[in-house]
Image: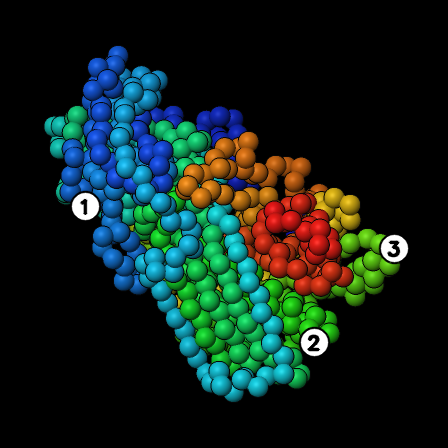
Amino acid sequence: MTASTAPLPHDTPAPLARVEDRRLLTGQGRYVHDVTRPGMLHAAFVRSVHARGRILSLDTGSAREAPDVVAVFAGADLAGLRLPATNPLWPTDDTRRLPLLPTDDIGSVGQPLAVVVARSARAAQAAAELVWADCETQTPQNDLDNEASAIGQVAFQHGRPEDAASAPHRVAVSQTQPRVLAFAMEPRAVVAEWDAAQQALCVWLGTQTPSRARADLASTLALPLDKVRVIAPDVGGAFGAKSSLSPEELVVAWVARALQASVKWTASRSEEFTSGVHGRGAQLRGELALDADGHFQHLQARLRFPVGAWLPFSAVVPSRNAARILPGPYRVDSVDIGSRAESSNAAAVNIYRGAGRPEATLLMERLVERAARRLRLDPVELRRRNLIAAGSMPYATPTGETLDAGDYRAALDLACEAFGYEAERAAQATRRAQGELVGIGLALYVEPCGQGWESARVTLLADGSVSVASGSSAQGQGHETSYAQIAAQALGVDAAHIAVLHGDTATCPEGVGALASRSMAIGGSAVLLAAQEAARRRDAGEALPLSAEQVYTAPAEAWSYGCVIARMSVDRDTGQPAIERIVWADDAGHIVSPQLAQGQLLGGMAQGIGQALLERLVYDGEGQLVTGSLMDYAVPRADDMPALDAIELVGLHRPTQANALGAKGVGEAGCIGVPAALLNAAADALSPWGEPELDFPLTAERLWRATQPPSSKVAP
């Protein structure tokens, strides 16, 4: 594996090695699971075994009498307490703010119905199994079963679609994206401690958004904001799934106050499958009209996204993002795009690494590949004819977005050069003549990288050390390394003397958090400006210690972009796919740490490969999750990844003017471009059998069936 990076300015210190690694790799990390408090109680939840129904009665008597049980609470005890409000990107029905524990209606398998509190986790779990729920079941509504279940929608119309009515070429694509599990190494966990003397709540929580979690806890429990503290220690993976509070986390906080105690709950892996938030899930349909020369004239798209039984804060973001990102890096004269978010009797769906960006890329890139075959044009040539020119930047898209900067043609050409595109096509023809099934797939993508504000505080101490406190938290991105690097350069000090604080609302300024590829672009810019202000005041003679705080609002949204080219073979006898090579050109703007950026790209690629080849959550007709364990759900392992020497990363790294640091997002790119390139490669490998509609995951069975005569095909 190789990685190319732009040279650093001559006054930039050498990139730091990850300062977090030694602590984490030697077992010195501290996660919520590691937190213990004096006299701490433990919670376990009684969960619905039905997908939809009504609670007729709830018998908790045996549980209350079980050994070491302190209390049992059900919906009536928490009457009036509802889930927090959602992101107001579009209006949603306020009745979707479900109660923390239901008193009557059940919306999904795994929904918490009651909570048992005991002196040990084992006692709590044993007592929870004694609670009997008598329910009247109802027929569940599965994902995308009923269009009348829409909870919100967005539409974009632009241009004159009638001008494309007589277009000589039209291609259509229909894609169904399964749900996947946002599989963090660390399941959800919460410790809530009530201080009776101070009438204050302290909550240890694995969260991406400590400040918002604090505000939601305060609002839900009717507490003053200054009486709530949230501490996010080390977080073992998040990927969007830990950006919102779950009902269980809010219930545990309520229980801690009710019992005036410390209470801990840790989710089992099974609970993560059934009641944790899921990712992806969509039905994508599109049609692209082209003129005789292959220029894109009109794009029509209809997108449907399931959101499940309750709404996390960012539930509608994937649906909105997919719509606003289309038509990606291409110039299209007119568009007609509609996107809907729809409820169902299943676990909630939240943002998951990419959050609508992968879906938009997949639909557009499948249309482009299909159009290239229809016109008998090389897919690279068709893209070159339709990419937005670098000279057109900033570019107003037909959905009302503004692409800040980008040279998409350069990314395509760089990827093709590194891949040896012409030679690879020639080798493919030779292998096909020998009977092999081998395909080459391309995907270009754009990645909006967060909007709004973030905060930072830089403190210069008298002993020469520096403290950097960020409102943005961390879940493995390496902020302790990168933020120290930014501050060190601005202050002209050794990064080893800088301590980075994050994740604690008592010691850090209020912030938005780490999600949507915004940490470096916006959070890093806040650190830079705060450090520059501290340096100016120090150099002007102000006495130490001094502290400079910055609330930075990005003037525009940065858009990273790139091109992925993949070669995949498919075994003719078994359908087994093999990723033989991936070449990937990405522009993430100014790179603070090449090592961290490369790690983010490879990590995203691993998750993208998991989505493309392996992962799928399945509910049956009764709303039961039939892929609810690692026996049934395939998370990628090391041996599912391509060999390291089969992956080549090349970079443009052109700074943006959209933020002070010049950075663009990098963390989600692998989940955006890689799956689309792999699907195009699989379709290219199977193109001798026409244009199969391939859905994820690209399992051996699914690919093998696509090669069989129609009379022998059986629905998988």
Question: Residue at coordinates 25% horizontally, 57% vertically from top-left?
Answer: 93
Locate residue 393, reporting x and y percent: 51, 76
Towards the viewer: 58 or 249:
58
Task: Name the residue nearer the viewer: 449 or 333.
Answer: 333
Disc 2 residue type (three-letter) = Leu
State which quadrant residue 374 falls in: bottom right
Residue 375, numbered circle: 2
Question: In this figure, which colouring scheme has been used for the structure?
Answer: rainbow
Q: Which residue is mark 3?
A: 434
* Residues at discs 2 and 3 in contact (Cβ within 8 Å): no
Secondary structure beneath dot 2 equals helix
Q: Position of residue 46 (x, y in %)?
A: 30, 29
Q: Earlier in the sequence, mark 2 or mark 3?
A: 2
Q: Amino acid at mark 1?
A: Ser
Q: Which of the two residues, 175 or 585, is positioned nearer the viewer here?
A: 175
Task: Return the residue found at the far top.
Answer: 67
Q: Residue at x 59, y 54 (%)?
A: 695
Q: CA distance from mark 2 to mark 3?
A: 26 Å
In the shown orientation, is residue 569 left or right of residue 153? right
C-alpha distance separating marks 2 and 1: 58 Å
Which percent across, then down, holds residue 364? 56, 66
Instruction: Judge left or right: residue 133 versus residue 681.
Output: left
| Label 1 crowd bin: few (<14), some (14–19), many (20+), radius 10 Å | some
Image quadrant in which you'd find residue 501: top left
Q: Is residue 476 left or right of residue 204?
A: right
Is 697 positioned to the left or the right of 522 in the image? right
Disc 3 marks a residue whose amino acid type is Gln
Q: Secondary structure at mark 3?
A: loop
Q: Which residue is mark 1?
A: 219
- Point out the tag, 1 or 3, that comes first from the N-terminus: 1
Q: Position of residue 58 (x, y in %)?
A: 22, 29
